[in-house]
Amino acid sequence: MATSHTSLAPQVGQGVGHTQAIPVTSAPISPIVSDEVRHILFTILVQVGQLVIASFGILSNVVNIIVYFKMGFSETSSVTLTALALTDLLTEIWLVLMAASLQSHYTGAQVTPLSVTIMYLLSTASNAVLGYGSWITAIISTERCLCIVFPLKVKSIFTVRRITMLLTVVLIIQLVSIIPTYATIELTYVQSPLTNRSTLVLARSEYSLYVETITMFALFTIPSVICFSIVVICTIFLVVKLNQSAKWRQSTSNATQGQEGTMSTKENRVVRTVVLICAIYIFCFAPNVLTVTTMAAYPDFNETDPYLGNLLSVCFIIAFPCHAICSAVNIFVYLGMSTKYRETFVKLFCPKKKKLNGALDKKP
């Protein structure tokens, strides 16, 4: 995953501080995706789309955190969703930084701009945060799955204390995983021959690149693939079990036809809500999971390949705005699925609307 950030703008400071020799080819190889197409997609999806969506995501996740803190942490769902909101907030901040800093990049620069260097420096930590978000989503989907399988035992299995400890342990593992990468990174001053000004750039040796690759697979690629698989399996299982439950209740209920219709509608609403939550994650993480899996299975699929390099860049250009969408739209899911969240939201941010609704309710 570490290669994803450099692949977005391969001309940015490419080769600065690297000890690897660039092979010289006798005949140019035409890439499968042209530089012009890559540049157009990068401008539209990252520099415009990602910047706008991630900026909204910062606001929406701040609102989510405030609402869940107001609701309290008496339930495990409040703990996990608050942790997810904090993770999404950090993700959106980094995505804004990435989109904004790369706008200052210009083709042909022989020295990487300082803002881009900072973005690269934080990229390892951002991957750890994304991986942590995947673990949280997997925990949420697993808990909901067990609510269907063991409805009477799930509260004793998933307590607030146990969920908090689990989230803390996973966070520590993710943070420890980034230490090798930062231990091998060096910052050095490089003078630009164009501006005659010195700026800090990352200096990576071949050894540090290997360490970074292994670390990224450990803290992001592997967790993302595992959690993605868990969420897909849990989503399928939940849909099947909830549909079976709805059919069983309809066939065995002694209620009237009207009550059966109400029960069926309620079950369908639950199915739609659960599927929506998991589908957002699956849809938004699928491009990145497919890309990193292909990179692992086919080593030639990398940013330095003259034929496939731009294609890899395009894959990540699509993946990052998807991350921004995934982290930004949760507020709409919460407003639609949770009455308690909606009531707390209205109380905090729309007090006049609450008073108006109360006054209308009191009218004869």
Image: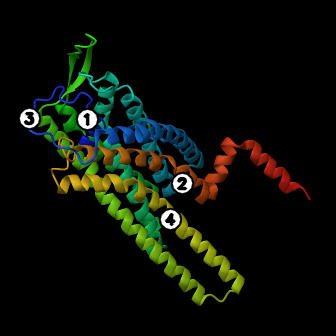
Identity, as a three-letter code, of the amino acid under mark 3: Val
Give the crowd class for mark 1: few <14, some 14-19, many >=20 residues within 10 Å: some
Residue at horizontal 37%, vertical 25%?
Answer: 104
Does label 4 or label 1 sit earlier along the sequence?
Answer: 1
Q: Residue 101 placed where, x, y %? A: 38, 28
Q: Where on the picture, by quarter, is residue 294?
A: bottom left
Q: Which residue is most to the front?
A: 27
C-alpha separation, residue under disc 3 versus residue under disc 1: 17 Å
Q: Mark 3 highlights which residue?
A: 24
In front of the other: 355 or 168: 355
Identity, as a three-letter code, of the amino acid under mark 4: Val
Q: Where on the picture, by quarter, is residue 265?
A: bottom right
Q: Mark 2 highlights which residue?
A: 74
Q: Mark 4 highlights which residue?
A: 274
Identity, as a three-letter code, of the amino acid under mark 2: Ser
Give the numbered dot on residue 83. Answer: none
Which of labels 3 and 4 is toward the front? Answer: 3
Q: Residue 309 placed where, x, y %? A: 22, 44
Which of labels 2 and 3 is toward the front? Answer: 3
